[in-house]
Image: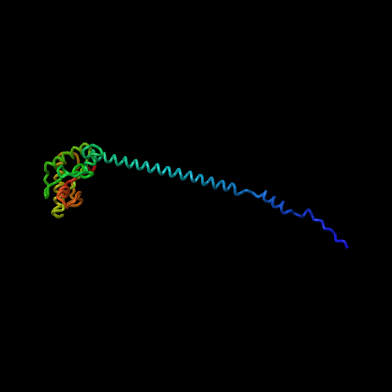
Amino acid sequence: MTTPVQTPNTATTTRPERSSKRVARKAPLGWLPWLLLLLLALLIAGIVAVLLASRDDNSSSSSGSQASTTSKVGAVAAGALVGGGGTAAADAATASSAATGAREAGTAGTVLFAEGSATLDADAQRVIAQAVTNLRRAGVRSVEVIGYTDVVAGQPVNAPLSQQRADAVAAQLKSSLPGVTVTTSAKGEADPIASNSTEQGRQQNRRAAIVARG
């Protein structure tokens, strides 16, 4: 008996090599556009971050410059109030001197007194006269005189004594500055500007500060 020869059916037989090549050739490249979009987004985000950082740096620089300018203007104004001359005068105005009369920062003048006294001596009169000139020049319409003492006598004595000192200076200002409102307050031994442990410090604390209010 002869075995029949089977011929392969070419219609159903596939060649794996050719099929795999065909699949690889037709595979879509859908990931490439998304990768490009991601890179573009990262690039844009980086540019935006750089621009924002640059703007913040410029704002900080501008704010610092403005603050510096404001500080200088304030110093010049303070210098004009205590006698003119800009920042140098403003610095000089904060220096305390027992011989010439102390000036506190932010005041038009500070009158010093002898221990236990509210009497205005020659130095005090001169400080008041200079303060009057400066207040007129600045066009100030309201002034407060604040009286102080050292700590020697104790607050029961110092409280009324500080008021007497403020009243003595205020009386001189009222007679020299018509139309200007002059008020007084008394702090006693509070708010010293120097140490009460030395005579020089106590002398600076026995004072009446002339403060422009408006």
- Colour mapping used in the image: rainbow
Vertical arrangement, residue 125 with respect to residue 20, above or below:
above
Q: Is residue 137 left or right of residue 70?
A: left
Q: Residue at x 62, y 48 (%)?
A: 29
Point out residue 36 in the picture as x, y percentages from the top left corner. 56, 46
Q: Residue furthest bottom?
A: 1
**Residue under the point 46% across and 45% down:** 49
Count of marks overlaid on the render: 0
Give the residue furthest to the front: 2
Quarter of the rendering occupied by the C terminus: top left
Question: Could you say where residue 147 lies in the image, as x and y percent from the top left?
Answer: 17, 48
Residue 196, position in %: x, y?
17, 52
Q: Quadrant of residue 2?
A: bottom right
- Left/right of residue 73 with respect to residue 38 in the rendered view: left
The reply, left or right, for residue 97 in relation to residue 69 is left
Instruction: Say which of 38 and 141 sits in front.
Output: 38
Query: Where is residue 66 shown, x and y percent of the image?
Result: 34, 41
Residue closest to the eye, 81 or 8 = 8
Quadrant location of the N terminus? Answer: bottom right
Residue 176 quadrant: top left
Q: Which residue shows up at 51% across the image and 45% down it?
A: 43
Q: Quadrant of residue 182?
A: top left
